[in-house]
Image: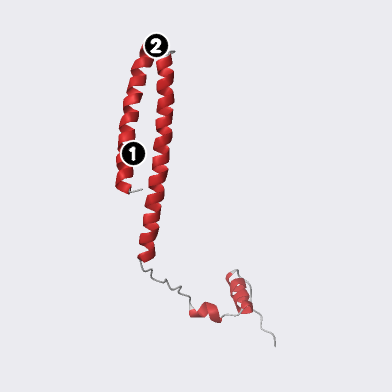
Amino acid sequence: MKTENLYEQMTEEARLLASETKRFQIVSAKNPICREAAELLASIRNRLNAFEHMTDESGLVMRSAAESHSATLERQQIKVKRSPRLRAISPGERAKRQAMKRGALLVRGV
């Protein structure tokens, strides 16, 4: 389904929905419990379901277009920068440094 055709159908559906909603407002103001009002409500519900289906369809079309477009784009690889100091420190040395930060006294064995 072409996107332009889908948008035209959605516009037409929205226009018809607004028109039926206005008609329902006028009819229900005169007599809220009548057959015409019930039929209009059913028609409005059907139009809303159709409109929901069209928005779902347009979302799928847009998503597939975006995915195909993003597949053509080249993405730069982000390099993770690591400090050379952190890689060179052993786990024991790291534990000693953390203890020193907490206020421990360093006692060297003889």
Front of the two marks 1 and 2: 1
Amino acid beneath label 2 = Asn
Judging by the rendered image, the residue that carries numbered circle 1 is 10
- Vertical arrangement, residue 18 with respect to residue 69, above or below: above
Q: Is residue 107 left or right of residue 37?
A: right
The answer to the question of whether label 1 and label 2 lie on touching residues, with beta carbons closer than 8 A, is no
Quarter of the image with the C terminus in it: bottom right
Residue 68 point in image, percent of width and height: 38, 60
- Vertical arrangement, residue 91 with respect to residue 75, above or below: below
Residue 4 point in image, percent of width and height: 29, 46
| Residue 31 tag number | 2
Residue lying at 64% horizontally and 75% vertically, measured from the top left: 105
Residue lying at 42% horizontally and 38% vertically, measured from the top left: 52
**Which type of secondary structure does the marked residue at label 2 adopt?**
loop
Residue 72 point in image, percent of width and height: 36, 65
- Vertical arrangement, residue 84 with respect to residue 67, above or below: below
Amino acid beneath label 1 = Met
Q: Is residue 66 left or right of residue 106?
A: left
